[in-house]
Image (tube, helix red, strand yellow):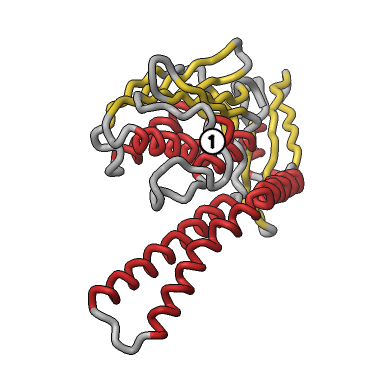
Amino acid sequence: MLQDALPEYWAALNGKAPWLLPQTVEVVRETPGGKAHERVRVHPLKTGACIIVVDESRLRELELAHRQMGRLASMGFMLASVCHEVANPLATLQSTLQVLQSQSHIPPAALQNALAKLSGNVGRVLAITRRLNAFSRVDDKSPMRFNVDFAIDEALAFFRQERWGVNVLTERRSDPEGIVLGYPGRLQQVFFNIFMNAAQAMQGRGTIIVVTRLVAQRSVEVTITDTGPGIAPEDLPRVFEAFFSTKVAGEGTGLGLAICYEIVHEHGGEIRVENASPRGACFIISLPFGAGSV
């Protein structure tokens, strides 16, 4: 019986669940075979109610596989750059080890310098592989509707805990209508990376201005402007390339903005950068407006 097999749906039919709404809701149920993703709509009738349940579990599996393939395809485009970038520290590791192996008596200062070089290059290779590994994975969570300012505020909270963010001022202009459909954690990563880039460009002191606005009920636009030196005109077209960086060697992996680009496009949006007036850089992120019924 429905009452025993699906008690939550039985409760909805009897008006005891908060689903009697003029829209479809998503329900995730635990079943013996795993999680079931279903779309549910309850229609009140004169003498009871009608419930429509559509099982989209297989569709969710296909969407997850599609996103995973998209991630791996994006990584494929980065592969040549990755090989080149990893080859440099590996070559340094090999040459340093050869020097150490060829000498039986090494002065303590020279030994410490060689060990520091080995440690630094190992750390760089590990940082690159961790960033790529984290980007290559997708979770099985369904996209959700949320105000993009939530992801921005979470990113700012983490940013202020970093040494680069301690002395950076922030100005915010939020929009309660800035609703998007996607993954808050992924977009939080985008905003955090941009905040960190801005802080490093400003040498840890300056102001970051973040403005959210709904544009013509079609897209949610987030602009992030800093008071740093800006970006050289010849570097602007390459900002989102993997491993392209204007930072001092050792400051980051050169993957942050490339990953931001992929995440934003995964959400059906666009990201671009330009120089602000009178100074500084301005990142503009445009995401599809996500309000409305399912």
Identify whether 93 is placed above or below 125.
Answer: below
Q: Which residue is drawn at 68% across and 52% down?
A: 76
Q: Which residue is drawn at 60% across and 21% down?
A: 289
Quarter-of-image position of residue 271: top right
Task: Look at the image and tell me whether residue 39 can be seen.
Answer: yes
Q: Mark 1 points at which residue?
A: 239
Quarter-of-image position of residue 279: top left
Where does the image place residue 27, in percent across and percent down from the top left? 63, 39
Q: What element carries label 1?
A: loop
Question: Could you say which is closer to the camera, residue 193 or residue 180?
Answer: 193
Task: Look at the image and tell me whether residue 154 can be seen.
Answer: no
Identify whether 130 is placed above or below 169.
Answer: below
Q: Residue at x 51, y 53 (%)?
A: 131
Task: Identify residue type, mark 1.
Answer: Val
Question: Could you say which is closer to the camera, residue 100 or residue 32?
Answer: 100
Identify whether 95 is placed above or below 82.
Answer: below
Quarter-of-image position of residue 9: top right
